[in-house]
Every structure is written in C-alpha cells, then in structure tokens.
Image (tube, rainbow, N blue to C red):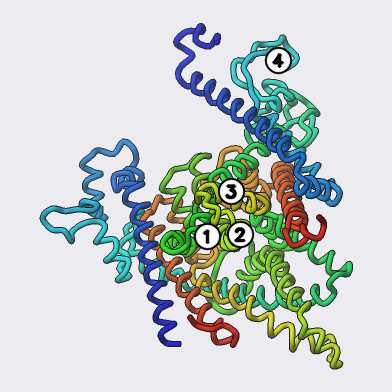
C-alpha cells in the first residue's frame, strides 16, 4: 500500500512538472515578457519604461540560456518560484500574490463547502428517488427535467435569480459579502441557490445512471428473492455499491473547493479566489493567472491521488499493481 | 470587382472585408458539399441508414429544430456585395458591403437610435417616433439594432464555435488516441502523460489563460476551446482502439502482413466513426455554453448570444425593465442546447454498438 501511494505521488509530481513546462511555454514563449510589459503599460509606452517594468517584475532575464550564469534564467526562476510557493508580486498592482490567495481562500470556502455538501446530498437523494421509479413516468419526467436544467446557461440562472429573488421578491441582497456570522447566510443564500440549481441537473442524471446500473445486478434480485423490502434494497445494497463510482466523482471535486467558483463569486461580489481570477483577466495580470492555474493543477493532482487511495480502501476488488 | 474603381478611399480594410466574405462563402459551400457528399456515401450503408431512420422516428422535432438553426447559420454565412435595397421609404440605394441572405431579409438601415420595445411605435426613452414603427418584432438594443436580426446572426456564431472547435478536437483526439491505443508502450505513455498534464489544469482557468495568451478573437477562442476539450475525447478513442485492436479481423489483417497505416485506416477508424458522431454532438452543447461564460468574462466571440446576454445584464436593473434583448438571446441559446442535448442522447441510444447488434 505504501509503495503504491509513493508511486502514485511520484507520478503526480511528474504531472505537476509537465504543467509547469506547459505554463512556461504559454506565459514566457507564446507571450513573451515584452508582450506582457506592453499590455501592462500600453502600446505606446517608451522602451525604457518597458525595460524598467521588466526589471521590477523579474522578467529581465534570458528565457532559457544565460551564458555566464546558467541558473539565472526565466525558466529556472519560474520553476524555483512555483515549487517553493514563492509566487512574487502581481503584474497589475504589485501586491504579493500569496497575500491575495490567503485572503481569498476564506470567502471561497464559505461558498463552496455548503454548496458541495448540500448539492451532493440533494443530488443523491433525488437520484435515488428517480431511480427507484425507473421505467415509469416519474423517471422519464425526472430525466427530462435534468436535461432541461442542463441546457440552461449558468448566466441565465444567475441573472434570473438576481432578478426574481433579489429584485422582485427582495428576500436576499443581490450581491455582496460580509464575514460576520449573523449576516453571512443572507449574503450566501442567493449564490448557494443558484449553484445548487445549476449543478443539480447533470449530477442527478449521473447518479441516476449509476444507481440504475447497480439495480440491474444479480445481488439486487437475490435480495428481493430473500424478501428484502424495496427501501432496504435501495439504502442498504444499492447505495453502498454505487458509492464506488460516486466516490471518484466526489473526491476529485474536494480540492477545487479551495479555488472557488469564478462565475458565482464575481457575479455575487464574493471576494474569493474566483474573483482574484476575474481581476487577473481584467487587469492583464499574467503572474496571478499563472499561479492560479498552477495551484489548480496541484489540487487536482492531489485529488486524483486521494481518489485512487480511497478506491483501494473502499473496494476490496481493486488490486494494486 | 468595382471596389477599386471607387478610388483610394476604398482602402485595404474594404479589400480585407471582401476577401473575408468570399472565403466564408467558399467554406460554406464546401461544408454543404461535404455534408451532402457524406450523406451520399453512407446512403447504402445499412448501419447508418437504420440509425438515421430510427433517429427521425424518435426525435423528429429536435431534428427539425437543429435543421432550422443550421439553415439560418448557412444563410447567414453566404454573403455577397451588390443589389439594391430600399431605405427608409426613399429610393433604393446600391449595397457596397457584403450582406448575407439573413441580412437581406431586413432593410439596409433597419436601426433606431436606442432602445425600443417589441413592435413599438415610439422610442423607449423619450418617445420620439421610430424610423420603422411597429416593425421591430423583438425590439431594438441599446445601439438601436434590431434584436431579431442580431439573434438570427447569433446562430452562425454558435454553430461556428461548435463546428470549428470540433474540427480541431476530432483530428487531434483521433491521431493521438488511435496512436496510443494501437501502438501502446512508449507512444501510449507519452500520450497519456500529455493528457494527464492537460487534464490536471482546471478547465475554465486553462481556457482563460489560453485566451489571455493567444489574444481575443474567434480563431483564438476556438483554438483554446479545442485545447481544453480534446483530452476527454482522446481518452474515449484510446479505450475503444484498445478494444478494436484485439478483435479477430484486426489480428487477421496484421497476420496477413498489412501495414499499420492500412489496418488503422481500413479497420480501426471505421469502428470509431459512431464515437466521433456521438462525441461531436455531446461536445457541441458544452462548447456553446462555455463560450457564453467566456463572453460574460469579456473574452468571448463578437456577435454571440453570450455577448447579448452579457449586455442585457444591467438592462434588468432599469425601470421599466428591458427584457427583450435577454429573452431573445437566451431563448435562442436554450432551444439550441436543449435540442442538441436531446439529439445527442437519442444518437447515443441509436448508434450504441450494444443496441446496434440487436437491431441488425
């Protein structure tokens, strides 16, 4: 088991290195530091200003090969910074990127954790319900509603909810954020509602497929033959066996709770990591964007390793090779 | 070729616009020709024929709606210069800009100064008389452009996003997926590494990073969407190739001494076509929805429904509410995505090899 975890982690490390190479190509070769400086200062900026900007932001090195000092290149610098989590300063307003990340994680988690837990519980409950009535009109209607819900753009959910609940009914504030516990829920209610509504279509459909497939197995027939009630079969037999494919989907999503939701956060004015990303787009802030992609991939690789390990723990049929 | 006779005032920009619409016409005709040719080739193939019939029988409405969208998009893709158009009740004037079939359904200056409600006689703010009273079926937007016209033109952008990106995704995924599945070992390891590297970057973030780096524009957005979405398809192709490679007739072909290339082209690829069709349809709706999100972030494609929705965001906070812009764009988007989703599911049922064998 330990050997497996080590090997899996090593492969994850190789993947992260691959991501770093990709990011280097993207951010230092496809767009050169000159491009980045020009975008920050404008097309008509004088060459001296561009050069000064590059010095200030650490872009003033040869990209791949420095004859005198081979370690003093952008490539080495890029790897060193990313691997030691020393992300430097933002290209847009010179604030340390690490500070921004630290400030953004809290609000992001406030939104994503409840969203994840409620969404998961509701999705599984609805899917169990629909699967229980499979091949009936309830099932067909349920699947159709799921497809309907999947076909609506996220934008429309957000605009619709802000208009309907926020403006017409005036139940909750349209946007904003306040970390004090008594008003936090009022600010989070609307983004939570939108997030759950928009995500439920595809997840209910996915879980339903899993359940329906499990329900056609032999052990379900055996359980029925020995006189188990339908409820017990669903809760005790089907749900437990279906947990394995669901687990893969769920654990891989956990790391992304930290990166927040770009759309929900910027629409509802939540100062989380999603908003940091949107600010980076609007401010041509390549350094922050690069860091966000890197952290996202780190978290994804971690999630993958966790998934594989949990697979082994949950399913005795899975053998390590 | 009269545009240079008008002297130097007609600059390079006009020449470029000219070439752009000629190019788009050629591409449109090629697409129509290619589509008809493909249909002609598979018309006797029993698998595709039964699948097609079954699809028509099961989902006639969805097929008709998608067909309508395609028709509108094709009509909007074929443009030409010339002809005369009536303007504002006055005399007809010659048209100097390329105008598509859809454009020609509307008068050449079919615009007002600013907002007007559907079928209104007067402007929304101020109440001045409109140039075309009662003729803007879906009203006009902030710049006075006819919303129905914009919505119809959005169909072309949506199909362009889906179609053009698929042109990037499908060859890429087929080449790498088949190579990895067929040759295995080192090739497989390499492809697998590239796939896991790309897949480990969060989709939307990678998309944003790519567009920031490549710049904003139709081609760049499609390219970025292609890079982020080929991995999933590649994985499917690789898995299917692994299965097909073990089939007896493929082994037999190898034993007969056929070259790898010939085996792939003759025996492996035909077994993947159903996957290509299904994935194309399922991919399509995701791509169009992603573009809407990108439009909202300010890095989308000009003229898309996503941009119309984005513009309509603060129109809802006005009083009285301006709803027609948002309603038109989102209805068009929703109807397309819904029918494509429905069609994709039906197509999967129809083309799935497991059900295929039962029907033959």
The residue at which mark 3 appears reads as B291
Quarter of the rendering containing residue B2: top right
Residue at image position (67%, 30%) is B33
Residue B233 location, x and y as percent? 57, 56
Please give the chain letter of the residue carrying mark 4.
B
Q: Earlier in the sequence, mark 1 or mark 3?
A: 1
Whole-Å distance between the Cαs marked 2 and 3? 35 Å
Disc 1 and disc 2 in contact, CB within 8 angstroms: yes
Question: Considering only vertical position in the picture, is A41 above or below A209?
Answer: above
Judge the density around disc 1: few (<14), some (14-19), many (≥20) Cα neighbours within 10 Å. many
Question: Considering only vertical position in the picture, is A172 above or below A59?
Answer: below
As drawn, the label of residue B85 is 4
In this rendering, would B206 be left or right of B301?
A: left
Please give the chain letter of the residue carrying mark 3.
B
The residue at which mark 2 appears reads as B244
Whole-Å distance between the Cαs marked 1 and 3? 31 Å
Q: Earlier in the sequence, mark 4 or mark 3?
A: 4
As drawn, the label of residue B181 is 1
């Amino acid at each position: 088991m330990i050997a497996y975890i080590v090997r899996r982690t090593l492969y994850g490390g190789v993947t992260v290195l691959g991501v770093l190479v990709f990011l280097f190509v993207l951010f230092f070769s496809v767009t050169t530091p000159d491009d980045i400086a020009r975008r920050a200062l404008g097309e008509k900026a004088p060459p001296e200003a561009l050069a000064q900007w590059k010095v200030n932001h650490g872009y003033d090195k040869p990209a791949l090969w420095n004859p005198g000092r081979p370690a003093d290149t952008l490539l080495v610098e890029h790897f060193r910074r990313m691997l030691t989590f020393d992300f430097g300063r933002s290209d847009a307003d010179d604030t340390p990127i690490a500070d921004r990340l630290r400030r953004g994680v809290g609000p992001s988690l406030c939104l994503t954790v409840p969203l994840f837990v409620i969404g998961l519980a509701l999705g599984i409950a609805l899917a169990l319900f629909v699967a229980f009535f499979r091949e009936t009109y309830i099932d067909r209607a349920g699947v159709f509603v799921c497809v309907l819900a999947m076909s609506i753009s996220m934008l429309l959910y957000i605009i619709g909810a802000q208009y309907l609940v926020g403006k017409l009914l005036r139940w909750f504030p349209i946007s904003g954020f306040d970390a004090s516990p008594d008003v936090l829920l009022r600010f989070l209610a609307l983004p939570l509602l939108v997030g759950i509504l928009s995500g439920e279509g595809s997840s209910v459909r996915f879980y339903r497929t899993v359940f329906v497939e499990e329900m056609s197995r032999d052990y379900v027939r055996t359980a029925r033959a020995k006189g188990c009630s339908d409820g017990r079969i669903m809760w005790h037999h089907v749900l437990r066996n279906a947990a394995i494919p669901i687990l893969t989907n769920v654990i891989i999503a956990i790391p992304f709770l930290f990166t927040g939701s770009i759309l929900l956060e910027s629409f509802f004015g939540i100062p989380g990591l999603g908003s940091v990303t949107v600010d980076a787009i609007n401010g041509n802030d390549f350094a922050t964007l690069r860091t966000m992609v890197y952290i996202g991939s780190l978290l994804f690789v971690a999630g993958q390793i966790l998934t594989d390990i949990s697979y082994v723990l949950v399913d005795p049929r899975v053998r390590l090779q | 070729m009269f545009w240079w006779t008008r002297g130097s005032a007609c600059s390079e920009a006009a020449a470029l616009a000219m070439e752009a619409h000629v190019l788009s016409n050629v591409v449109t005709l090629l697409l129509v020709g290619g589509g008809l040719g493909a249909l002609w080739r598979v018309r006797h193939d029993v698998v595709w024929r039964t699948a097609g019939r079954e699809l028509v029988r099961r989902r006639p409405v969805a097929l008709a709606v998608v067909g309508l969208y395609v028709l509108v998009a094709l009509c909007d893709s074929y443009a030409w210069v010339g002809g005369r158009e009536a303007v504002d009740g006055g005399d007809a004037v010659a048209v100097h800009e390329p105008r598509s079939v859809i454009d020609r359904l509307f008068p050449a200056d079919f615009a007002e100064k600013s907002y007007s409600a559907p079928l209104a006689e007067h402007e929304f703010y101020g109440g001045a008389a409109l140039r075309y009273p009662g003729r803007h079926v879906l009203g006009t937007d902030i710049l006075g452009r006819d919303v129905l016209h914009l919505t119809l033109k959005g169909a072309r952008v949506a199909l362009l996003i889906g179609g053009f990106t698929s042109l990037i995704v499908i060859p890429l995924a087929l080449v790498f997926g088949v190579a990895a599945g067929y040759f295995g070992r080192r090739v497989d390891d390499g492809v697998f590494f590239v796939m896991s590297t790309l897949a480990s970057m969060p989709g939307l973030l990678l998309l944003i990073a790519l567009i920031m780096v490549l710049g904003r524009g139709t081609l760049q957005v499609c390219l970025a969407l292609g890079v982020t979405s080929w991995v999933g398809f590649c994985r499917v192709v690789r898995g299917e190739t692994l299965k097909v490679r073990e089939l007896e007739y493929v082994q037999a072909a190898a034993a007969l001494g056929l070259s790898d290339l010939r085996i792939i082209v003759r025996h492996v690829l035909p077994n993947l076509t159903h996957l290509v069709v299904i994935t194309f349809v399922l991919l399509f709706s995701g791509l169009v929805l992603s573009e809407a999100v990108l439009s909202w972030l300010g890095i989308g494609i000009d003229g898309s429904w996503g941009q119309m929705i984005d513009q309509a965001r603060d129109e809802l906070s006005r009083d009285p509410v301006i709803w027609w812009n948002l309603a038109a764009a989102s209805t068009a988007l929703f109807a397309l995505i819904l029918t494509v989703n429905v069609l994709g599911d039906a197509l999967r049922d129809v083309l799935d090899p497991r059900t295929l064998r039962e029907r033959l």
